[in-house]
Amino acid sequence: MAKKDQQKPGWKSIPEGGLIIEPGNADDYKTGGWRTYRPMIDQEICINCHICWIYCPDSSIISKDEEIKGYDYDHCKGCGICANECPVDAITMLEEGNLSEK
Amino acid sequence: MSNQVALTGNEAIANAMRQINPDVVAAYPITPQTEIVQIFSQFVADGEVDTDFVTVESEHSAMSASVGASASGARAMTATAANGLALMWEILYIAASTRLPIVMPVVNRALSGPINIHCDHSDSMGARDSGWIQLYAENAQEAYDNTIQAFKIGEHEDVKLPVMVNMDGFIISHAVENFNILADEDVQEFIGEYNPEHTLLDAENPITVGPIDLQDYYFEHKRQQSEAVKHAKKVVAEVAEEYNELTGRGFSYFEEYKLDDAEVGIVALGSTTGTAKAAVDNLRDEGIKAGLLKLRLYRPFPAEEITEALSNLKVLAVLDRAETFSDTGGPVFADIRSALYNADSEIEAVNYIYGLGGRDTQVDEIEAVYKDLQDILESGEVEERVQYLGVRE
C-alpha cells in the first residue's frame, strides 16, 4: 500500500456503502493540480459583467461587492471557458509550466 | 394467529408481499417473470396494499428502480427468474455494495441456452458472489417463511444487505400446497417499521448515493461488505429464532434429517430435499444409515456449522442443480469441499449434478446415490468424483 493511502481512514470509520453524508465536501477535493493552463484576469480591462462567473463549471471565480476579484486556484481546473466567454478579452490563459511563481 | 391455506408457491410469495406491504415494487411483467408480481399487481389494483407499483421496461430497470427506491428510504421489492435475473446482473452488485436491503423472490429457473424455462439453480447460483444473502426453500411454506423474514435480516443495522428468496420454478412456484399463513397484523408486528439512518429523501441531512469510489476507498467499502456478511450469519439465526417463537416453524441455516447416526449423507437445497427425505426413509427401512442436510442459507455460507453437523458421516454426496463448467463439479460441492478441508475432515465427498432444465429427479434416483455412497463406504474408493444424475448416456 502506498504511504498516502495509509494516512486515510480505515474501513471501520468511513460511511457504509460509499455514501457521502457530508454535503458540499467537494470543496475539500483540490482539483487545481489538474490545471495545465492558468487563467489570468486583467482588472483594467474587466467590465465586471460576471459572464465568466456564470459560465465557470467549478465556481472558481471569486466575486465580491459585485466585482470580479480573481480565481480560486485550489479548484480551477484551467478549462478556459472563462477566457473563451469573456466579451472584452480580459482573460488570458498562461501555461503553468512557464510560470515561475504560484 | 395463523390460517391454513392451499396456494401455489407464487401465490404464497405474493401474499407474503401483500402482508409486508412494501413501499415500492418495481417489476417487468413479461417472461421470464413469474406470476408473483402479476398476483401482487392485483392486490395493488384492489387497494389491499399501499405500494407504489412501478412498471419498468426491463429487469435491469426493475433492479435500478428498486435501488433508487431503497436509497430513498423505501422498503423495495421486485421478483424475477432465470434470464430476468441475468439482465439485472450489473445492478445486483450495485444494490449489495450500496448496502440497500431490497428483498427479491427469485423463482429458480434454467438460464438459456438452449432455451428452457424450467427449474434449475443456474440463475441464482451464478449470482452467489454478488453480495446478496441467499435463502433456499424446500416447499411453499418455507418460501413464504423466508420472504417474511427477509426484510428483518436485510434491514438489520449490522447487515444492510439485499436478500434473495429462492424458490424452485414450477415444482414449488406452480404447485398448490397446504401451508400456514400468518395473520396480516402478526407479519406487520414481526417486520416492524423501517427507519434507515441515511436516506435520499431526508432533506435535513442531504447525502450522495453511489459516487465514484476509486483506488483510495473502494477496497475499504468492499471490506465493510465482507464484515456485513459475517454479521448476516448471526442475524439470520436470530431472526429465525424469533420467527420460530412466533410460528413454531423454521431453522436457522439448515435442517438435519436423520443425520445424527448417519454414515452416508446428502447435502442439497431446494425442492429435491423433499424427495431426498423420502429416499432416506426408504433406506432407513432397509437398515441403511442414510441422512440429509438441507441447506437454507447458502450466502453467507455457514461452513463451520455444516462441517460440525456432517462430522459423523463417512461418505457424503453433494447434489447440485447447477453446473459451474469448471470441471470440478457444482457450486455447492466446491463450498462444501472447501469447508471440509478447513475442518480437516476425512469424509469422502462426491458430487452429483442433477435436474438441469427441469429434468425430474425421483426418489429411486436419490436412493441410487445413497447406494453409490454405500459402495464407496465398502470399497473405500471413489471412481468418479463428479457425476451426472438422470442424464441419458
Image (cartoon, rainbow, N blue to C red):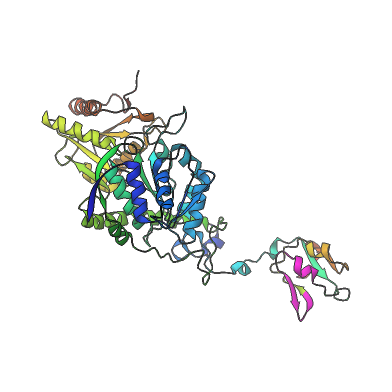
Q: Position of residue A36 (x, y in %)?
A: 76, 60
The residue lying at 34 percent from left, 62 percent from top is B192
Residue at 15% x, 30% y is B282
Where A72 sits versus B12, above or below? below
Residue B352 quadrant: top left
B84 drawn magenta: no
Relative to B105, residue B69 above or below: below
For residue B311, say whether it is visible: no
- Nearest the viewer among B179 and B322 is B179
The region drawn magenta spans A49-69
Q: Is residue B16 above or below residue A24?
A: above
Q: Quadrant of the N terminus of chain B?
A: bottom left
Where does the image place residue B53, in percent across and percent down from the top left? Answer: 47, 52
Residue B141 x, y percent position in the rendering: 27, 45
Farthest-out residue, front: B46
Q: Residue B9: in sight, yes or no? A: yes
Which one is in front, B135 or B52?
A: B52
Which residue shows up at 14% across the image and 39% down it? B261
